[in-house]
């Protein structure tokens, strides 16, 4: 997955008139208490601002700061620094001078502060594998940037609707940066909060949904249900291409199977995943009603489980049936008793339709099959000669089941108890007459 990148609108930046040039001529000519800087300072600033060569501009800016360390023009000098360094892809230096600008606090207008936070966020997102301290600072700065964003006035000539739409893009930028920084700093709970804030504005965002799944899995303790929910949202995002969706679904399936103790019942896992993929796009947050039975739940359900208890629970329906089936699917049960109702021999397999019975009375009354049993001819060719109406026991693996009213258990990898298979009638040996001895008549 590629690292997330947010692109905020140039319209908002232009409308706010960020980092405008100071009217030095007017202030220098005013004299007295209104003059905040000298003409020499202004000319030095102008020379630096006009310089197009990056290295030469940095030299002029360094000279300015050395000569005028407390200048009233520093709020125009620092942006030149961080824009220069950003253009050179020197992101640590970009952040350094954004922070110098931010540290000026009330001496800087909200739009100019916003500009610095904005550039800082972009610079952090461009850093590969930032260390924990850099990440912590980036998260704090991004959250502060959101506060400054709230203070921005609507520019003249821009409608409320357009202004709010442009601000939403900046909300995504700052929250996305805070989320990425939280992940890098291993503040997974904080990262999750920020990714959720991104999704409140852009709910179908592929990367934020996927990264939120990662954040929930990285928490201590992990939150696998929430993680699976957001992986499912990522897999079904309109922004996901076919390969991305396929890759996420493959990982999600493994995660679900592991959550249930490595279940080997493929049809059940597929059904559970399909259900999740249908539900997740409908809600950003996982509803409390969505549950997935855990390995511990399944271990408890399997304690003292028999095929008789499985049949009883499945026929009862409801939550008990769902839990029992999740626990029983894929398990092998020995010597399952039944009455053979129908038999269909094939080329490679024999299909037995049997009725599950546990007593003589049930055996006598059984006329409708409720178990479908598949036996490989290569394993037991004699199974093809079983006769209807006879008792039959088999050992097999539960594969699927159909609930009432047409209740049916489907079994695979089955073998009939050898005692119940038809016995071959031994052929009588052919006795040849002994040859006559010579001389005998």
Image: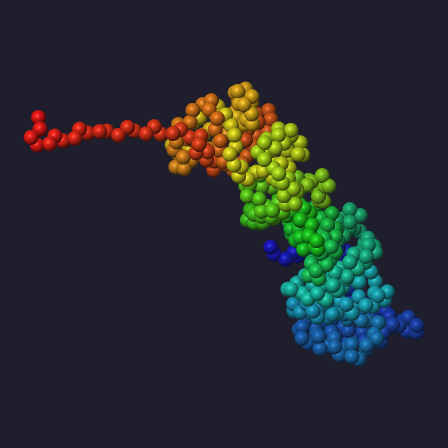
The residue lying furthest to the right in this view is: 33
Q: Examine the image and state in which quarter residue 378 appears.
A: top left
x, y (%) of residue 10? 71, 56
Q: Is residue 237 visible?
A: no
x, y (%) of residue 139? 74, 60
Check the image and report above or below for 147 versus 63: above
x, y (%) of residue 163? 78, 50
Check the image and report above or below for 336 versus 204: above
Q: Please give left or right for residue 397 compared with residue 46 in the image.
A: left
Q: Residue at x 46, y 33 (%)?
A: 417
Q: Which residue is drawn at 75% across and 69% down?
A: 97
Colour mapping used in the image: rainbow
Q: Examine the image and state in which quarter residue 237 appears.
A: top right
Q: Which residue is drawn at 48% across and 33% down?
A: 394
Number of numbered labels in the structure image: 0
Q: Which of 409 and 188 is in front in this view?
A: 409
Q: Is the C terminus in the top left, top right, bottom left or bottom right quadrant?
A: top left
The residue lying furthest to the front in this view is: 440
Check the image and report above or below for 89 versus 256: below
Q: Examine the image and state in which quarter residue 15 appears.
A: bottom right
Q: Please give left or right for residue 389 compared with residue 303 in the image.
A: left
Q: Nearer the viewer, residue 150 or 423?
A: 423
């Amino acid at each position: 997955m590629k690292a997330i990148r947010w692109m905020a609108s140039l319209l908002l930046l232009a409308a706010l008139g960020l980092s405008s040039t100071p009217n030095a001529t007017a202030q220098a000519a005013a004299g007295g208490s209104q003059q905040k800087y000298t003409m020499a300072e202004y000319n030095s600033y102008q020379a630096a601002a006009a310089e197009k060569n990056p290295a030469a501009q940095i030299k002029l800016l360094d000279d300015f700061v050395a000569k005028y360390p407390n200048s009233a023009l520093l709020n125009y000098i620092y942006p030149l620094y961080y824009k220069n360094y950003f253009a050179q892809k020197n992101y640590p230096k970009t952040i350094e001078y954004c922070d110098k600008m931010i540290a000026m606090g009330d001496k800087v207008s909200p739009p100019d502060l916003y500009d610095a936070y904005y550039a800082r966020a972009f610079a952090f997102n461009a850093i590969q594998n930032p260390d924990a301290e850099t990440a912590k600072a980036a998260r704090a700065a991004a959250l502060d940037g959101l506060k400054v964003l709230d203070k921005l006035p609507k520019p003249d000539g821009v409608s409320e609707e357009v202004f709010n739409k442009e601000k939403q893009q900046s909300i995504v930028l700052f929250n996305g940066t805070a989320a990425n920084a939280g992940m890098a700093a291993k503040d997974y709970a904080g990262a999750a909060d920020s990714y959720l804030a991104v999704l409140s504005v852009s709910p179908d965002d592929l990367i934020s949904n996927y990264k939120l799944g990662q954040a929930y899995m990285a928490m201590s303790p992990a939150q696998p249900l929430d993680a699976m929910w957001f992986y499912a949202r990522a897999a079904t995002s309109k922004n996901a291409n076919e390969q991305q969706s396929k890759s996420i679904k493959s990982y999600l399936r493994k995660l679900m199977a592991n959550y249930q103790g490595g279940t080997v019942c493929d049809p059940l896992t597929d059904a559970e995943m399909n259900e999740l993929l249908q539900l997740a796009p409908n809600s950003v947050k996982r509803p409390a009603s969505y549950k997935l039975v855990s390995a511990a739940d399944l271990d408890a359900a399997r304690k003292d489980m028999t095929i008789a208890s499985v049949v009883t629970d499945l026929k009862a329906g409801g939550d008990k049936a769902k839990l029992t089936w999740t626990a029983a699917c894929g398990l092998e049960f020995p010597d399952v008793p039944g009455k053979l109702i129908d038999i269909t021999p094939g080329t490679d397999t024999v299909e037995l339709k049997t009725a599950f019975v546990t007593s003589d009375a049930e055996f006598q009354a059984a006329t409708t099959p409720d178990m479908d049993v598949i036996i490989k001819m290569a394993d037991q060719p004699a199974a093809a000669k079983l006769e209807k109406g006879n008792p039959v026991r088999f050992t097999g693996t539960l594969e699927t089941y159909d609930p009432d009213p047409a209740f049916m258990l489907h079994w695979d990898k089955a073998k009939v108890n050898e005692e119940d298979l038809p016995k071959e009638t031994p052929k009588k040996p052919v006795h040849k007459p002994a040859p006559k001895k010579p001389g005998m008549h």
